[in-house]
Image (tube, coloured by chain):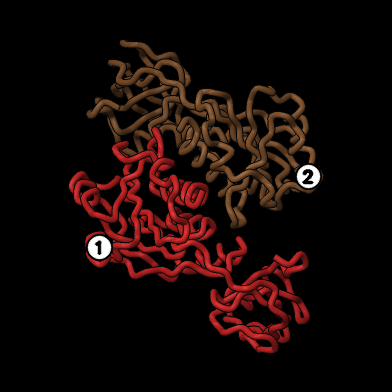
Chain colours: A brown, B red
C-alpha cells in the first residue's frame, strides 16, 4: 500500500481509470457525509475487484449521492487465493461474523448450503454481500468475495468442480489433523472448506461426504468448535499452511 | 464425552463429589427455569475446572436459586494447553467475541494489556469472565480461562515469566511465518500470544517487543487482519501446529 494512501476505502462496481468520474450509491454517500464527516475535497481510495486501487477526490457530496473524480492508481490488481467457504447458514449475528472473518482471511467466494440439521431456512444474500464488502474495504483487500446462490448441500456436491479440493471440517475427530492435510498444499490451486451447522453434520451426511473423491475430512483439534469458529479456524490454518 | 451425557453444562465454583449438593447462583437458576424451561428432575452436567464433569439432578428450582444433587462423574479432569492470550482491549462486541473464541480454542488465561494506541480505557473483567464461562459451558471444556488483571503492556512484559514463549502477532509482515515459528513447538510448554489494538502496535512498541528474549514475532499472512481476527487466527494455528 502507498504510505500516504487514503485510509477510507470504498468498493464500487464501476470501471476505474485515471480522470474518470464515479457516482456513489446513496448509502455510501451517507457513510462519507454523516459517519466519517468528510466533505468536498476529501480523498478516498476506490477498488472494484478488477482495476486495482485508485485515489479519488470527493467532488460533490449531498444527501442522495456523491460524485468522485478518480486520480492515480495506487495499487495494481492482484489475485488472492482461490478459496471458497461452503457453509451451513447459521443465525443472524453469527452469519455476519462468518462473512466478515472469511473475507478478512481471504475467501474468494461464500456459498451457503442447506444440510439436514440446518436450522436457518432463508439466507439474506444482500446482507452477506454487505458484510463482505465492508470487511473487504476495511482489511485492504482488492476484491470482494462472491456470494453464491444458497442451495441444498447435495446440489452443491453434484455440481462440484472435481479439481477443487474440499476440506470437510469433521467435528467427530475422525479427520486428518489439519496441519498434516495442508502440509505442502498448493496455494495456487482451487480450494474450499465445508463447515456444518451448529448441530453438526448428520452421520449419513458425513459418511457420504467422506466418500467424495475431492473431499478430505480434517480435524481442527480436540475441542468442539462452534460452526463460526470452525470456519475461521480452517481459513486461518489454510493461510498459515498452504504453500509453506 | 459419555454418549448420554446431559446436553446442558454448567460451570460452578463449588467442589464436586458424588452425593453432594450444589446451589446455583440466581442467574443460572433463571437460565435453567426461564430460558431452557427445565424443571425438578431434569439432568444437567456440572464442572468446576478441578474435579472433572458430573451428572446432577435438579432438586429444587425457584426464582431466587436452585439446588442440584450430584450423581456420578462422567469425565475425569484433564488439562488443556497452557496458552495465554495477551491482548489490547477492543470495543464491546468484539471483546466479547475474543473471550468466546479464545475460550473455544483452548485459552488458559486472558490478559488485557494497555498499549499506546489502545482506545478502550476500562475493561469489564466480570463481563469477560461471563463470556468465557458461557463459551466453556457450550464447547465442552472442563475449565474456564482465568481473567488476569488488566495492566499496562510494559508492566506485563516486566513481570513476564521468561520460560513462557510469547508469539507477537506482527501486522507489519516482518515476523516469521506462523507455520514456521510453530513447527515442532512443544504443546506441553507454556505459551502465549500477544495481539495489538485495532490501530496496531506503535513502531517503538514493536521494536522493544521484538528485542525481548521470550518474544517471537510472527506473520499471519498477507492480509491485514482485525485485532479480533488475529487473536483467533493465531490460536487456531497454535492448535493445528503445536505438537505436530
Q: Quadrant of residue A196?
A: top right
Residue occupying image coordinates x 39% and y 33%:
B222
Q: Is residue A200 above or below residue B69?
A: above
The subunit carrying tag 1 is: B
Task: Tell me, for residue B120, which label it has, or none.
Answer: none
Residue to which mark 1 is pinned: B152
For mark 2, does the 10 Å Cα neighbourhood hold few (<14), some (14 to 19), or many (20 or more) residues?
Answer: some
Name the side, left or right, on which B184 lies relative to B119. Answer: right
Question: Disc 1 versus disc 2: distance between alpha carbons?
Answer: 49 Å
Query: B78 or B226, which is in the foreground?
Result: B78
- The residue indicated by pointer 2 is A116
Name above or below for residue A77 compared with residue A179: above
* Residue B176 seen: yes
The residue at the point 56 percent across, 41 percent down is: A180
Q: Tell me whether the residue at label 1 lies in contact with that at label 2, contact meaning CB atoms closer than 8 angstroms.
A: no
Front residue (pair B131, A25):
B131
How many other residues sit within 10 Å of disc 1, few (<14), some (14-19) or many (≥20)? few
Residue at image x 66%, y 89%? Answer: B20
Who's the residue at 67% across and 29% down the image? A149
Amino acid at each position: 500500500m502507498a504510505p500516504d494512501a487514503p485510509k477510507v476505502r470504498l468498493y464500487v462496481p464501476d470501471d476505474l481509470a485515471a480522470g474518470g468520474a464515479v457516482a456513489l450509491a446513496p448509502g455510501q454517500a451517507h457513510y462519507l457525509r454523516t459517519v466519517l464527516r468528510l466533505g468536498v475535497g476529501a480523498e478516498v481510495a476506490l477498488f472494484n475487484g478488477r482495476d486495482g486501487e485508485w485515489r479519488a477526490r470527493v467532488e460533490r457530496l449531498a444527501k442522495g449521492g456523491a460524485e468522485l473524480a478518480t486520480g492515480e492508481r495506487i495499487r495494481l490488481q492482484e489475485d488472492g487465493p482461490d478459496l471458497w467457504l461452503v457453509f451451513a447458514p447459521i443465525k443472524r449475528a453469527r452469519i455476519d461474523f462468518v462473512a466478515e472473518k472469511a473475507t478478512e482471511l481471504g475467501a474468494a467466494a461464500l456459498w451457503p448450503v442447506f444440510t439436514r440439521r440446518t436450522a436457518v431456512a432463508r439466507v439474506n444474500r444482500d446482507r452477506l454481500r454487505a458484510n463482505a464488502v465492508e470487511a473487504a474495504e476495511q482489511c485492504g483487500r482488492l476484491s470482494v468475495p462472491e456470494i453464491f446462490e444458497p442451495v441444498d448441500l447435495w446440489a452443491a456436491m453434484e455440481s462440484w468442480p472435481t479439481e477443487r479440493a474440499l476440506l470437510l471440517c469433521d467435528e467427530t475427530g475422525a479427520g486428518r489433523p489439519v496441519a498434516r492435510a495442508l502440509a505442502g498444499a498448493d496455494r495456487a490451486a482451487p480450494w474450499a472448506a465445508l463447515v456444518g451447522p451448529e448441530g453438526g453434520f448428520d452421520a449419513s451426511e458425513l459418511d457420504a461426504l467422506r466418500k467424495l473423491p475431492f473431499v478430505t475430512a480434517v480435524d481442527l483439534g480436540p475441542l468442539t468448535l462452534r460452526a463460526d469458529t470452525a470456519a475461521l479456524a480452517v481459513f486461518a490454518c489454510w493461510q498459515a499452511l498452504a504453500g509453506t
